[in-house]
Image (spheres, grey):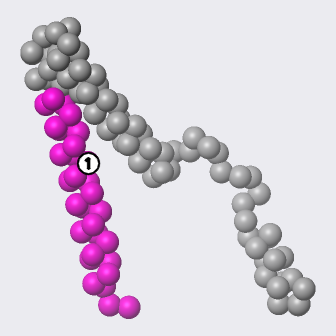
Amino acid sequence: MDFNTSLATQSYAQARAAVPPEAGGSGPGSLFEQAASSFVDAVKAGEDTAKAAMAGQADPHALVQALAQTELAIETAVTVRNKVVEAYQEILRMPV
């Protein structure tokens, strides 16, 4: 191991956090995780209601309501995706 590698290793060891980050933190990652989980739950509930309606176990009103909630969840996810893409493209256009 050469001298520069040793210095880099020591600098990294001193710079990293003394305590590892918590698994259920309150950062942007956890917000994304909650949003994704909510989206999956909404789509899954819509699918379950649609299956029940096809089997004759759910009334049409519940099916329409579940489909509307699923549509809203998908539209929200697409809007968020579009905003992220717009922000990324704006960053790419910034002069360096």
Reply above or below: 51 against 29.
above
Residue at position x 71%, y 52% from top? 20
* Bounds of the magenta segment: 67-96
Residue at position x 38%, y 42% from top? 36
Indicate yes or no whether the magenta region holds residue 19. no
Which residue is under mark 1? 77
Reply above or below: 39 against 79.
above
Residue at position x 31%, y 72% from top? 88
Reply above or below: 85 against 63.
below
Report the predominant secondary structure element of the magenta stretch.
Answer: helix
Left or right of 33? Residue 69 is left
Q: Quadrant of residue 91?
A: bottom left
Indicate yes or no whether the magenta region holds residue 70. yes
Estimate the x, y position of residue 29 in percent, counting from the top left: 48, 51
73 vs 47, nearest the viewer: 47
Estimate the x, y position of residue 80 in percent, counting from the top left: 26, 54
Estimate the x, y position of residue 47 in percent, counting from the top left: 26, 27
